[in-house]
Image (spheres, coloured by chain):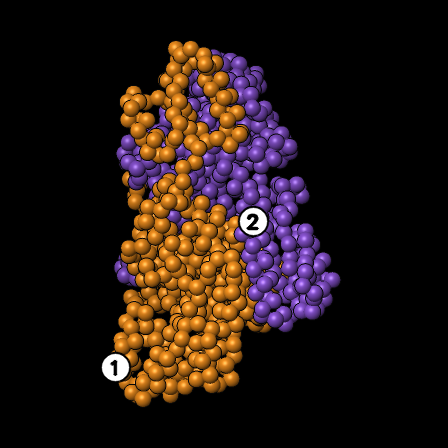
Chain colours: A orange, B purple
Amino acid sequence: MAFIKKPVTGMRDILPGEMELRVRLQGIIRETYLRYGFTEIETPLVEHIGNLTGKQGGENEKLIFKILKRGESLKRSLETFGESLKGDDAANALDGGALTEEGLRYDLTLPLSRYYAANSGQLPQPFKALQMGPVFRADRPQKGRFRQFTQCDIDILGDPTNLAEKELILATTEALHNIGFDRYDFYVAINDRRFLFELIRYAGFPEDDAEEILITLDKADKIGAEGVDKELSEMGYAEESILKLRKLLDGCGTDAAGVKAFASAIGTETAMNAGENVSDIMDSVTGFKGRKIRLKFDPTLVRGMGYYTGTIFEIKTDAFGSSVGGGGRYDRMVGRFIGQDTPAVGFSIGFERIMSILMEDGSGLIKNEDKSAWLIEKGMPEDRLKEIFNEAGEKRSEGHRILMVWMAKNKKFQKEGLTAQGYTEIREFYINELKH
Amino acid sequence: MAFIKKPVTGMRDILPGEMELRVRLQGIIRETYLRYGFTEIETPLVEHIGNLTGKQGGENEKLIFKILKRGESLKRSLETFGESLKGDDAANALDGGALTEEGLRYDLTLPLSRYYAANSGQLPQPFKALQMGPVFRADRPQKGRFRQFTQCDIDILGDPTNLAEKELILATTEALHNIGFDRYDFYVAINDRRFLFELIRYAGFPEDDAEEILITLDKADKIGAEGVDKELSEMGYAEESILKLRKLLDGCGTDAAGVKAFASAIGTETAMNAGENVSDIMDSVTGFKGRKIRLKFDPTLVRGMGYYTGTIFEIKTDAFGSSVGGGGRYDRMVGRFIGQDTPAVGFSIGFERIMSILMEDGSGLIKNEDKSAWLIEKGMPEDRLKEIFNEAGEKRSEGHRILMVWMAKNKKFQKEGLTAQGYTEIREFYINELKH
């Protein structure tokens, strides 16, 4: 039987040119984060299905790659499963986890929380974690969205203060700076989840509808203020509430003073605390002298994941619609594992988004290394070949990159190809050459 | 519901100390291979189930993590599957691939062959590929063997000559040299698969039994020559054949001259070609002046995978029982994808094996970076905090690694912990300090 040569649906092969850039970017990002005191860790790509489907991952839980049980465990499950095996019931049972006890992770945050819960005795406190690795979502394939993609996260666990948020923002913006992303004039949009619920109460919306109102509010940067108001109106909410919300949002400044004014307008203790938190972060970070760091308070920033409890942020640029990174505080996730909450906050770089921007942009980041290609005439005697190996060995041990290949019949074509691959020096070795 | 905090069975969390060493080793290995003209690539971790179960992976095909179909495709399969759903039949159907169209890759060689078949028009010829990444085998969990582990492979596709084998051996031994593995006095055991079949014919064994005879022969380094002879005798083979095989094997030298004598003793054209191949490789590589490279001809080296067609090799040390790497020529695998054979040869480093040796050995490879911890008294005023951020920012941008944390109540304990984590400098910042 012939094999299939295309990758599986929604996943892709990474060709040498892109791979070189990926490795270089990952190296720069890693080095930046290490300088901020983060330590790198790794969790398995496979996770307990119960952890993955525990209502922490929002929409992503519908997109899990589930792994079939094996051996005896499969046989036992089949006995139970057999009775329900009719049409949609069977499909639903399988979707619900029958025949499955493991799945591929859909993000790095849930496995990190498990990791911290399992290993906290052996970890520094607070724990500053760096993770880079693939995650999986069985999304409908579409341009620029893949079923396997790399995430790059930093998280601080065990620090309840916003020193954690400040360090995350400093580190992430510096990583973006170091990979040359400044040219896109990015900024960090910031908000506090606590504001969102206060806002709903303040404007007089029914509190039970908070989730769906927030989903609409979150669309502000796509459908605009008018679009949000129209949608809320169509959903049947009182015009008075919609107007009150609109007035508050429209009057809101994007700097630290704006945050304070916003909090005062709502006026509750929770709002004042959130205001203190966000304005303090903005104040600290924008005072940073090393680089210009832009922060903008955005009271319509929501972020999808249900697990956020405080500060939330997103990296945006005016040049591109979607965000290129985001994160926030999730103080209650570790508690799902050990019964005791642990303060936690994380920032994730949208590595694939950044890669696709830099690839389309013909980025100057792809620099040529010092690379030589040595073309050897076919039939070169063994003794001479040994000498060539030795010469190459010496240069390689000094750090030079040397490709050793047989000379092709069409040498001109071969040399053009090598030049296109970035070989800056091409040497030719002939059987009858004079020793040089 | 409480979440499970242990990793899934057979997989593990990687703690900071080990991770640091892993990243460092991978960096050194990558850099070494780049100097040999290899280019790094990546394939998806998920592969077509038909490719994985196509009789290329030997025993590993029994250990595949299979992914459950989703949505409509799952519903359609359930309709067909339903009828056979009784006890073992159902389990066998699922094992056979019902409800599954994808699985996790169990090695890097099969995906590379698919990759080459799919992308060869965009790849240099010959193509020298470097891959580092996780593979998955649902093996019975046991000490030192995990269900997810990292492989690190180099392969040359499109070169029919043994220049490819020579480069692979030079590069792999140099990578091991560069990570400090010389202290284990490793050597490369080498053989040619073509010898093995000639050997069976020469000794007069039934050719149809070749596979099982080779499985016994492969145990030579575990059960010894006597053990092999005894097992063959118990399997019912003629004493004459066993003696003839034994005499040939015992008389065999391990150097290039030994290979030639061995080939001549068998005397067929195929054996002479294999002999020419192996002795030529040994001659070239042992003549290398940069480092001492030890090669030993081992006519009992078999290697499990069915796809090898010519040269095979393994990295061994007298200090450890099992091999720490291996590879060989597999000229017919790419043909399974495109109907046309492509010469191919690869060498894989047993990354996890090497990691566990270095970790147990308290290796000197874990070096201390220049790392500072800055302890900040809680309640530090915002203005002073900003100054500290700026000072840290300056040092970080110069490459220093600085951890910024709140001073703990038990400062002595905190400082001891930081020293244990490798922080060589600890600075303290107090609210009432004099400006320095």
- Residue B229 visible? The answer is no
Give the structural element (helix, strand or loop) at label 2.
Answer: loop
Indicate whether A170 appears above or below A246. Answer: above
Local packing at callout 1 (Cα closer than 10 Å; few below 14, some 14-19, many 20+) is few
From the viewer's side, name the closer residue of A194 and B215.
A194
Q: Is residue A389 above or below residue B264?
A: below
Mark 2–mark 1 distance (CA, rounded to whole Å):
55 Å
Residue B404: x and y in percent read 61, 60
Residue at numbered disc 2: B399
Q: Chain of mark 1?
A: A
Crowd class of label 2 (few under 14; some 14 to 19; many from 20; radius 10 Å)? some
Amino acid identity at mark 2: Gly
The residue furthest right is B412
> How far from the left and from the top, in percent, is residue A184?
37, 56
Q: Residue at x 52, y 38 (%)?
A: B29
The residue that disc 1 covers is: A234
Quadrant that contains the N terminus of chain A: top left
From the viewer's perspective, is A422 left or right of B278? left
For residue B135, above or below residue B375: above
Say the numbered circle drawn on residue B307.
Answer: none
Marks 2 and 1 belong to one chain: no
Residue A249 in sight from this viewpoint: yes
Query: Observer-nearest residue: B178 or B276?
Result: B178
Residue at coordinates 35% horizontally, 34% vertically from top-left?
Answer: A421
